[in-house]
Amino acid sequence: MASSPSLDRTWEGRAVALLSEPALEHGTGGGVGDSRMGAGGAGDSRMVARSAEARECASLWPPHSHSGQVTIPPSISLSSVTYQATTRTSMATSRSLCGSRSSTMLAAALLLLLSTSAVAQLDVGHYSKTCPHVEQIVREEMLGILQEAPTLAGPFLRLHFHDCFVRGCDASVLIDSTDVANKPAEKDAPPNKSLRGFGAVQRVKDRLQSACPNTVSCADVLALMARDAVVLAGGPTWPVALGRRDGRVSIANETNQLPPPTSNFTRLSKMFAAKGLDAKDIVVLSGGHTLGTARCVSFTDRLYNFTGANNPTDVDPALDAAYRARLKSHCRSLADNTTLAEMDPGSFLTFDAGYYRLVAKRRGILHSDSALLEHPTTRAYVERQATGLFAAEFFRDFAESMVKMGNIGVLTGDQGEIRSKCYAVNK
């Protein structure tokens, strides 16, 4: 786990140019509000340095047998979701990259088993006969992508979040607008203009198309890439039930379902509840802000124009004064739309529980981060994680909440389609 960021540490929430990755990013398009999970300096090689360990880890996760079934104890099955037991003691000892433990996988798998009937139509072994190596292919591509562009780990997580909160997890966020002026798609809506990683998603899809033509949905690709991105950044793993179908509709105006960065807890609660997520899911999924950066414009009102008075003293009193001064030296104006600040300074490429230490010290950058201190349930969780003693608990909780989020509004059976290109509906 990363140590708690401090003000005497070298300030790393610096202005950073976006990586020049046109082939991987493919277009524009963004978690709670304008947070840019994963954007960073082109020279950062912390994740690349772990590539050897990543390859070793790749053989251990996601835990599955050759039939594509997840590894948990025997005799646990429900409907089409059946798990085969195998012994993988190395999974329990893998820490720094795999970031997984037997209890995390078991808890997430059990949650998957106990989900609603609609979710029961998803199956961890959905492609066991039609594309048996789907997870291996995605894993191999993710290793290559993150070696080339390590700052994309956060954006992949964010893409999945933004997809699931609008029309469910149907890959509608990936569709290009056919008429930007009159009928813009989700990716051209203001909350999504800072999304990244579209080209990388298509790269994975193309590889799957070659191996298993017209079989694996773009929605499933996003779900698998988000999971693998977290694991490769040092976080937990979880079983991803598959069988999602791709939607054929993408409407920019529907992105009003995405929680904005200015949300207080009441608003967060209503918007998450509309997706079947509760207060614990809010605080746990917010922990994903340990990865990535935020554009200054998404929080500069807290520094310069909190009540609308538009003077140097008009600041958000909920933000730690010393930290606020540091942010002001970094984000020089209210309208700064290009400078980026790390959400978890010094640790923005690593998935850990350090984010909660920041929030507990009133150093969460976004309004929505500070909002976690407004409710007793979420505040208690923040304070517990801020002790640094319960990271394994956070990893388990995050895995469980990601399973829940990945099941929002899924299309299955003969609904939707399997797109051949993730950025366009089939003709």
Image: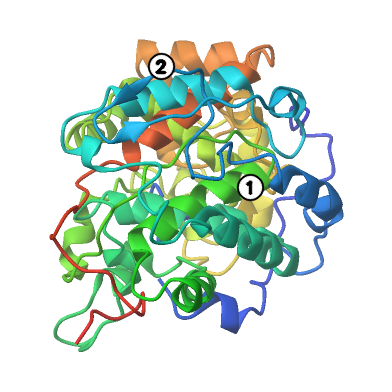
Where does residue 323 sit, x and y in percent of width and height?
Answer: 65, 36
Q: Which mark is residue 327?
A: 1
Can you identify the residue that label 2 sits on? 75
- Which of the pair 405/221 is nearer the observer? 221
* Displayed quadrant of residue 61: top right
Front label number (1 vs 2)? 2
Query: From the viewer's perspective, is residue 4 above or below residue 15?
Result: above
Give the total number of marks visible in the rendering. Answer: 2
Task: Indicate the amino acid at tag 2.
Answer: Ser
N-terminal label among 1 and 2: 2
Q: Residue at x 55, y 13 (%)?
A: 383
Please tell me which residue is depicted at 47% across the width and 65% down the height of the picture. Answer: 335
Residue at the spot 40% in from the left edge and 41% down from the top edge:
124
**Residue shown at the point (48%, 52%) measured from the top left:** 224
Q: Quadrant of the image for the N terminus?
A: top right
Return the residue nearer the eye: 409 or 315. 409
